[in-house]
Image (spheres, rainbow, N blue to C red):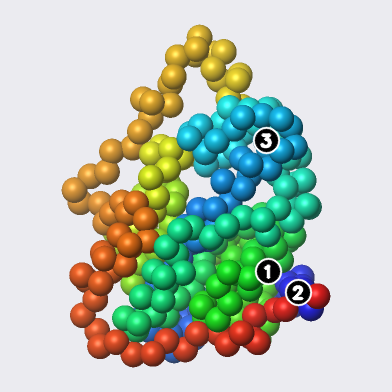
């Protein structure tokens, strides 16, 4: 049976979502929040490979200068890119994405340290959420206690409360959860956590897109390049972290485990992970 998040939205308010997160905080301590895309799942690698297969391009993630794909070479205009993103998920291309090297071993090491693991990831389309759960079944079944989708249009809960969709941001979710830290690949998320809220944050991966902020303005790469007369403007937009920021860059999963291990002072205890039968099963 595939996940149907829409069936449980009626009457589920943000207050109830916060109560559910508070309940998780009480029963799942100590807790680590983990992003999915490009932290656990090589989503961008698969997107580049799919684009090359579909459109005959020679795209690689080395030219993914920004988190929004339309701001990168080869994706086309904003409407064209949005159509491609919809097609990518309509074809369930996420299922062809590999896991990030070292993620499985790293998560096992964190569980041995006594941590409970929760997915906190942003999703736009409902199809993306269903695809995400199916991908987790295949690669990390039994690893995560909860899957929480941030910045949703409404509050939703499914699978006996194990899968939660909420209008809350990642920062609000992690604050309610009382998580030890978040592991995420976006620098704007890192700044929201580690600079403005002073919450610990591991900025994951040696990626081009997490060197610079993805602003909310919409423009496509070839239009911007024309405006800049061919100047490689993105190289001037790298974010410099400050000593007071509670943000630490980690290149890979061994560095994640090392950083957390060095700062773990609680007594290790077994983590109550979701048993294989708890995650929704695809038909």
Residue 53 pos. (x, y %)? 71, 38
Q: Which secondary structure, mark 2?
A: loop
How far, Cα to Cα, is label 2 from label 3?
28 Å
Q: Nearer the viewer, residue 249 or 168?
A: 249
Above or below: residue 281 compared with residue 255? below
How far, Cα to Cα, is label 1 from label 2?
7 Å
* The disc label shown at residue 134, or none: 1
Q: Earlier in the sequence, mark 1 or mark 2?
A: 1
Look at mark 2 in the image and give the residue it sits on.
282
Crowd rating for badge 1 (residues with CA inside 10 Å; few <14, some 14–19, many 20+): many
Crowd rating for badge 2 (residues with CA inside 10 Å; few <14, some 14–19, many 20+): few
Q: Nearer the viewer, residue 231 or 213?
A: 231
The residue drawn where x is 20% and y is 51% is 244
- Check if mark 1's residue and mark 2's residue have beta carbons within 8 Å: yes
Q: Quadrant of residue 6?
A: bottom right
Q: Earlier in the sequence, mark 2 or mark 3?
A: 3
Q: Nearer the viewer, residue 11 or 203?
A: 203
Residue 127 pos. (x, y %)? 74, 60
């Amino acid at each position: 049976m595939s996940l149907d998040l829409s069936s449980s939205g009626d009457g589920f308010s943000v207050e109830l979502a916060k109560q559910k997160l508070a309940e998780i905080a009480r029963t799942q301590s100590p807790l680590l929040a983990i992003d999915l895309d490009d932290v656990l799942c090589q989503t961008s690698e698969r997107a580049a490979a799919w684009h090359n297969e579909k459109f005959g391009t020679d795209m690689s993630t080395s030219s993914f200068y920004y988190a929004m794909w339309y701001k990168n070479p080869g994706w086309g205009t904003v409407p064209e890119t949005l159509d491609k993103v919809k097609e990518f998920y309509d074809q369930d291309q996420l299922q062809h994405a590999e896991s990030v090297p070292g993620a499985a071993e790293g998560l096992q090491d964190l569980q041995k340290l006594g941590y409970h693991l929760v997915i906190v990831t942003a999703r736009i389309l409902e199809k993306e959420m269903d695809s995400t759960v199916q991908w987790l079944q295949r690669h990390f079944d039994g690893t995560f206690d909860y899957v929480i989708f941030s910045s949703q249009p409404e509050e939703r809960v499914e699978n006996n409360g194990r899968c939660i969709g909420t209008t809350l941001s990642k920062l609000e979710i992690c604050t309610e959860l009382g998580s030890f830290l978040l592991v995420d690949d976006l620098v704007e998320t890192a700044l929201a956590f580690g600079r403005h809220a002073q919450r610990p944050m591991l900025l994951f991966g040696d990626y081009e897109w997490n060197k610079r902020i993805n602003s909310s303005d919409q423009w496509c790469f070839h239009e911007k390049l024309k405006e800049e007369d061919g100047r490689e403007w993105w190289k001037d937009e790298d974010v410099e972290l400050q000593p007071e920021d509670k943000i630490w860059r980690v290149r890979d999963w061994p560095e994640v485990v090392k950083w957390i291990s060095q700062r773990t002072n609680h007594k290790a205890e077994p983590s109550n992970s979701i048993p294989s039968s708890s995650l929704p099963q695809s038909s």
